[in-house]
């Protein structure tokens, strides 16, 4: 059972966007339809607007992640990263999602590599410090760096339960190494 507003169906996902600018041009209507299920098809008045298509592709990757369809999420995030001219913020958000999908799919080295790329762009960002620090600690590597990174995250948001959990997990990793 899904909420009436949900875009998740039993077979897959359908994402559509209105396309009225083409309607105004000779009443020609194009359709951009992104689906996650082979049998998902619909009739619609939806756009060929590059910015909106990009947003929907990014959303679709997130939906795949929510459905634990990690390889499909990875593939979709990679499609978004290939789009020319995407903003730095979108690139960062896509890479964070891609890293998580890799890790959840069991490919820790790829997830770590992507997070390291994001970290290099902004080594002060709490979420990246937490995620990469946790990933290091979880693997029992770079433990001193992991602790520093997680402490940066906790200092920025001391009440964030995820960051506090990372600190506990990182401490447990150090104790296990002794």
Image: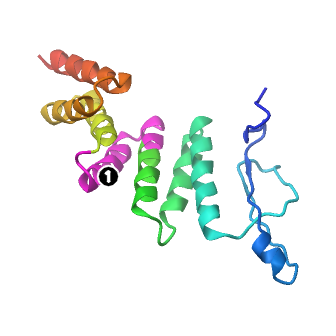
Residue 76 % position (x, y): 57, 54
Q: Give the image quarter of residue 148.
A: top left
Q: Give the image quarter of residue 127.
A: top left
Say which element carries label 1: helix
Going by the image, does 38 lie left or right of 158? Answer: right
The residue at 47%/66% (across/down) is 86
- Specify the quadrant that holds the N terminus: top right
Going by the image, does 17 lie left or right of 167? Answer: right
The residue at 23%/16% (across/down) is 172
Numbered range of the magenta stretch: 100-124
Residue 173 % position (x, y): 22, 21
69 up-or-down from 83: above or below: above
43 up-or-down from 178: above or below: below
Per the picture, the main secondary structure of the magenta-coloured stretch is helix
From where the camera sits, is residue 68 visible? Answer: no
From where the camera sits, is residue 104 visible? Answer: yes
Q: Residues within 10 Å of mark 1 (few under 14, many from 20)?
A: many
The residue at 30%/54% (across/down) is 117
């Amino acid at each position: 059972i899904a909420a009436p507003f949900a875009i998740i169906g039993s077979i897959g996902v359908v994402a559509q966007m209105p396309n009225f600018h083409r309607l105004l041009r000779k009443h020609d209507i194009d359709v951009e339809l992104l689906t996650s299920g082979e049998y998902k098809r619909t009739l619609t008045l939806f756009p060929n607007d590059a910015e909106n298509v990009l947003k929907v592709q990014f959303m679709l990757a997130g939906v795949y992640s929510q459905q634990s369809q990690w390889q499909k999420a990875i593939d979709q995030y990679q499609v978004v990263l290939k789009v020319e001219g995407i903003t730095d913020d979108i690139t960062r958000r896509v890479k964070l999602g891609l890293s998580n999908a890799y890790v959840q799919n069991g490919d820790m080295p790829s997830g770590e590599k992507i997070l390291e790329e994001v970290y290099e762009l902004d080594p002060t960002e709490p979420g990246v410090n937490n995620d990469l620090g946790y990933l290091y600690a979880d693997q029992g590597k770079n433990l001193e760096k992991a602790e520093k990174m997680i402490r940066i995250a906790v200092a920025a948001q001391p009440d964030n339960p995820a960051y506090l959990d990372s600190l506990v997990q990182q401490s447990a990793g150090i104790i296990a190494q002794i």
